[in-house]
Image (cartoon, helix red, strand yellow):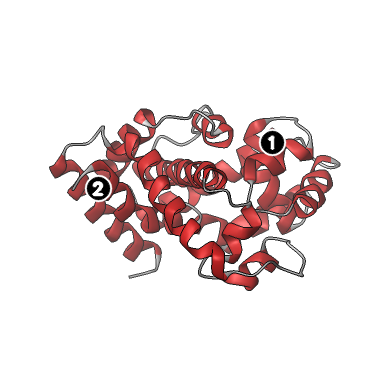
Amino acid sequence: MTPEQLAAACKPLVLELGEAFARCPSTLRRARLLGISGWAFYITGRAGALGDVRAETVAAALGFIAPEAVTDGWDAAARTVPPLEVAAANLAECCRWGTARLGDGAESSRLAALLGRAVDAADGSGMPLFAAWRAMPVPDPSPGARAAVGMLLLREHFAGAYLLAVRAAGLTPLEAVLAGPEGEAGAAACGWAPPYPPVGPLVRRRLWAEAVTDRLASAAFRALDAAEGAELLGLLGAARLRARGG
């Protein structure tokens, strides 16, 4: 596989695994311990790595969530706890999930090593959220934790690349969400209110943006040779089975 093909093959696995910890009941309990809602924890836990910035900056970095919904979550959390503290709590939950779900065996250690090389090689230009997360210190050095954090980081890299590609395609973030597999339901989940623009003319542009995303993300995977790329893909598949309880 070429680096672009490897990026395309890894993308659905990374997108699923990189946010799996966020749906864990223990992660949701952390929000209550901080005294904030689950939505405030999601927004600030994800964007808090940027530090104490304005909600408008957060909305620009996240891209695909409606600015009003971002503001609601960000400002609600900021009234109670500093953004970096929420981000640190989110990272700790990611590590906890990785240790519990992925374990500390040889597979997790190898997965963490390959992911780490890809993350280090990734180009963070125009991706402030990915760059901010890559600069965050990882509190747990165990293999499962490092593997989980590596998937979180690559997920933010793919998300940042997709946002750049969507804008280059002439789409707004809302249009990209509408043209995606979840359509209007996805737009509503991201806080966008109807009426929505027609989807038909947008699909071809979104498919082009998906291809450009793979091209932008491929720099991370050039750090691996062909055998290592195939190994990473297999390890991600095995990690998904373990994460799903298989």
Name which of mark 2 and mark 1 comes first in the sequence. 1
Q: Is residue 26 visible?
A: no
> Mark 2 highlights which residue?
232
Establish if 125 lies above or below 102.
above
**Residue 156 placement (x, y as % from top left):** 50, 43
* Whole-number angstrom distance, CA of label 2 to CA of label 1: 32 Å
Q: Residue at x 79, y 45 (%)?
A: 77
Image quadrant where one finds the C terminus: bottom left
Mark 1 element type: helix
Residue 37, percent from left and from top: 76, 56
- The residue positioned 49% from the left and 56% from the top of the image is 205
Q: Is residue 21 visible?
A: yes
Q: Residue 177: percent from the left, percent from the top?
A: 59, 61
According to the picture, the residue beneath numbered tag 1 turns out to be 85
Up-down relation of residue 227 to residue 210 (above or below)? above
Query: Nearer the viewer's eye, disc 2 or disc 1?
Result: 2
Q: Secondary structure at mark 2?
A: helix
